[in-house]
Image (spheres, rainbow, N blue to C red):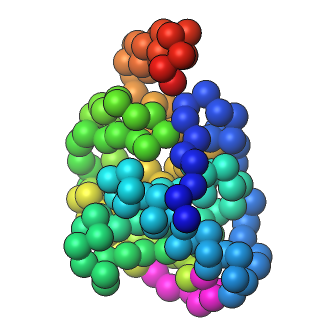
Amino acid sequence: MLLEIRKYGDPVLETPCETVADFGSAALKQLADNMFETMYANKGVGLAAPQVGVLKRLTVIDVSAGERPEAKLVLVNPEIVSREGDQLGEEGCLSIPGFREDVRRSMKVRVRAFDVDGNAFEVEGDELLARAFQHEIDHLHGVLFLKHLSPLKRDLIRRKISKLVKAGEW
């Protein structure tokens, strides 16, 4: 089932999420499935629960855009445990459609998380996957990629979004 993606300006996007405790529940598994369906329908590579209005520490990621089933990742209560290197690259966000900017992130990260059944695991990613981990985990803390931009760029985007809101296009 496709879920509604919340857009910038919705307070849920800047609210820190609650730790997931209902491991193995049908509701948690369904939420993850619906999030993948929504992410693929919107041509994203990651989607965090607050982006669909759910304040839970859950994110789905697939940097293959559905091309490789083994690339699908569900991260419940994820935490970055190590970072290495530095990269500067373009980022966008399904909650801030139409806006892309260069963001500096770690080149390689290691994440500790749980699957929907509560099994702990660690996963490492570099380049795009590392960027996706950092972007989606930021969402779980109520942080949007705009916070990583200069105040000037952030203000420009906010002004453009305000104009879109006034025009009824946001």
- Quadrant of res 18: bottom right
Residue 140 % position (x, y): 60, 54
Residue lying at 41% horizontally and 66% vertically, measured from the top left: 61
Count all numbered tags in the image, as a single digit: 0
Look at the image and tell me whether residue 71 can be seen.
yes
Residue placed most toward the observer, 105 or 77: 77
Lateral position of residue 105 relative to residue 50, left or right: left
Residue lying at 25% horizontally and 68% vertically, measured from the top left: 64
Lateral position of residue 71 relative to residue 60, left or right: left
Residue 2 % position (x, y): 53, 58
Residue lying at 69% horizontally and 61% vertically, measured from the top left: 56
Report the span colored magenta. 116-122
Q: Quadrant of the N terminus?
A: bottom right
Residue 114 % position (x, y): 58, 80
Residue 170 sits above or below residue 156 on the image: below
Residue 4 % position (x, y): 57, 48
As for residue 32 lying within the magenta part, the answer is no
Residue 120 sits above or below residue 56 on the image: below
Residue placed most toward the observer, 51 or 84: 51
Residue 3 sits above or below residue 94 on the image: below
As for residue 117 lying within the magenta part, the answer is yes
Residue 16 sits above or below residue 69 on the image: above
Q: Residue furthest front?
A: 1
Lateral position of residue 19 relative to residue 78, left or right: right
Look at the image and tell me whether residue 134 can be seen.
no
- Quadrant of res 104: top left
Residue lying at 34% horizontally and 30% vertically, measured from the top left: 98
